[in-house]
Amino acid sequence: MKRSERLVAMTHFILDRPRELISLPFFSEKYHAAKSSISEDLGIINKMFQHEGIGYLESVSGASGGVKYIPAFSKEYSEEFVHQLCRRLESPERLLPGGYLFMSDILGDPEATRSIGRLFASAFRDREIDAIITVATKGIPLAYAVASYLNVPVVIARRDPKVTEGSTLSINYVSGSTRKIQTMVLTKRSLKEGSKVCIIDDFMKAGGTISGMKNLLNEFNAEVVGIGVLAEAEDEDEERVVDDYISLVQILNADDRKGSIEVIPGNLLNYL
């Protein structure tokens, strides 16, 4: 195999396995090349990843060491994407009653969803995470996008139990925006006891749903190590019950009667 061919093959292999430790002997055996050549190839790949602003290779020393691909957008690309997203969301046609925003087209856009997933993965790259959790249904595409870059499984909390999921744990919680009592269910087989979990959701107003997920995770003795929301809305009439979170955008002055809205970057850029 020529070096140019090996570089392409190694790059593809690494991109498909984010945060997975890959040893130099493995590459050496797979591509029939000396370890010194493999080491040089990895240096080239790492340099190009950083040049393109898509992440970097983390070296792990020792007998069981190797390299890990850490997906991370550059600060410049992240700022550009977030500001583009703000402009995209500021259309008055997106306004829904109650200060909500229509975002289904963005959540259904594979390119936008992948970029959002990598942004959250960049923000959470230094945290030890065993699983991503979200609540059905709109947060599911985002959860899978983040999980694909962190290389961890997705757990979905539902409003109603499914007979195909076996025994479940359920809690009742108060919705932060509607003040109604709702139910959240999670199958017992979906999450290991004591897991470190990251919560991902599409929209947060008062934070009641996320607070409900945290209470549900307590039943599994799980530790919440991160919370990420695509959009947060300011609601002066409600006291927010969640304060430690990362948001991509923040919705201000949403008035469906006047047809006015302002969308600004959230706090995610502070974590990159």
Image (spheres, helix red, strand yellow):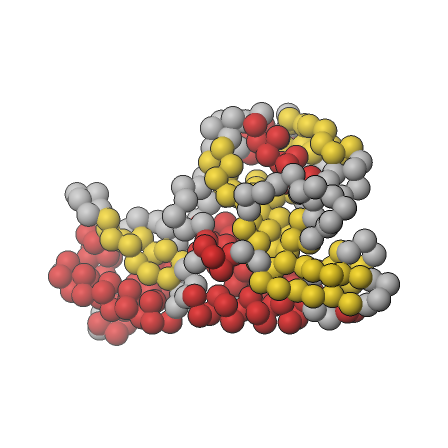
Q: Quadrant of residue 130?
A: top left
In the image, is 164 to the left or to the right of 99?
A: left
Residue found at x 86% / y 63%: 257
Q: Residue 236 at x, y = what percent?
A: 73, 49
Q: Residue at x 82, y 62 (%)?
A: 256
Q: Residue at x 69, y 66 (%)?
A: 262
Q: Position of residue 94 (x, y in %)?
A: 76, 65
In the image, 111: left or right of 272? right
Image: 247 above or below 238: below
Q: From the image, which quarter does the C terminus lie in?
A: bottom left
Comparing 153 with 259, the one in front is: 259
Residue 162 seen in the current view: no
Q: Which one is in front, 217 or 240?
A: 240
Depicted 58 relative to depicted 93: above or below:
above
Q: Nearer the viewer, residue 177 or 36?
A: 177
The residue positioned 57% from the left and 58% from the top of the image is 266
Count up the numbered dots. Answer: 0
- Residue farthest along the right direction in this orientation: 257
Task: Judge from the rendering whether residue 27 lies leftward or rightward of residue 196; answer left or right.
Answer: left
Give the x, y percent position of residue 214: 59, 34
